[in-house]
Amino acid sequence: MTTKQSVEPLPWLLFSAGGVMAAMFLPVLVFLFGFAFPLGWISAPTYDDVHGVLRSPLTILVLFVVLMLSLFHAAHRFRYTLYDGLQIKHLNVPVAVFCYGGAIVGTVAAAVLLVQVR
């Protein structure tokens, strides 16, 4: 007896990891760049300081992973929101291609931008 293996755990893994990354890193970035720096609570870093941090391959890798996983998290959440909210499960393939294709395009764009910054 053979069992058919599904790829369904992969999107759920990316969803879970993206949720963790988004929950850990994005609130800190929103706080710093949305409140603390503009309101003067913390002195804002200079362009040279930020550019110096972005030259590190480790920083580029961390930013890439956070962006990639956050995009796949959003794609998976949007896919199942469409399925459950609009009841369009019959459009499984086009919706999945649209959602995950968008996440892949966003990931490639993030990689290109991060490489250009460096």
Image: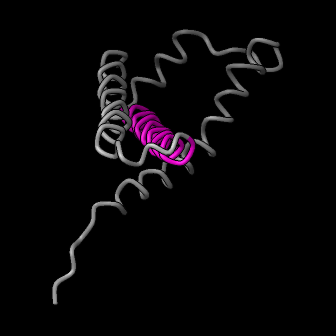
Q: Is residue 71 above or below residue 55?
A: below
Taking the view exactly as shown, the residue that stands out farthest to the bottom is 1
> Hey, which quadrant is residue 68 in on the image?
top left
Q: Is residue 108 above or below residue 70?
A: above
For the N terminus, give its image quadrant.
bottom left
Q: Position of residue 14 (x, y in %)?
A: 42, 51
Q: Nearer the viewer, residue 6 or 23?
A: 6
Q: Does the segment drawn in magenta span residue 74?
A: yes
The quadrant in which the C terminus is found is top left
Q: Nearer the viewer, residue 3 or 64?
A: 3
Q: How is the image coloured?
A: one colour
Q: Quadrant of residue 99?
A: top left
Question: For residue 45, which quarter of the picture?
Answer: top right
Q: Is residue 44 magenta?
A: no
Which secondary structure dominates the residues rendered in magenta?
helix
In the image, residue 26 lies at what x, y percent? Answer: 61, 35
Examine the rendered structure and indicate whether residue 98 appears above or below residue 37: below
Name the residue rendered at 42%, 42% in the picture.
Answer: 72
Between 110 and 11, which is closer to the camera in this rendering? 11
Over which residues does the magenta segment extend? 57-85
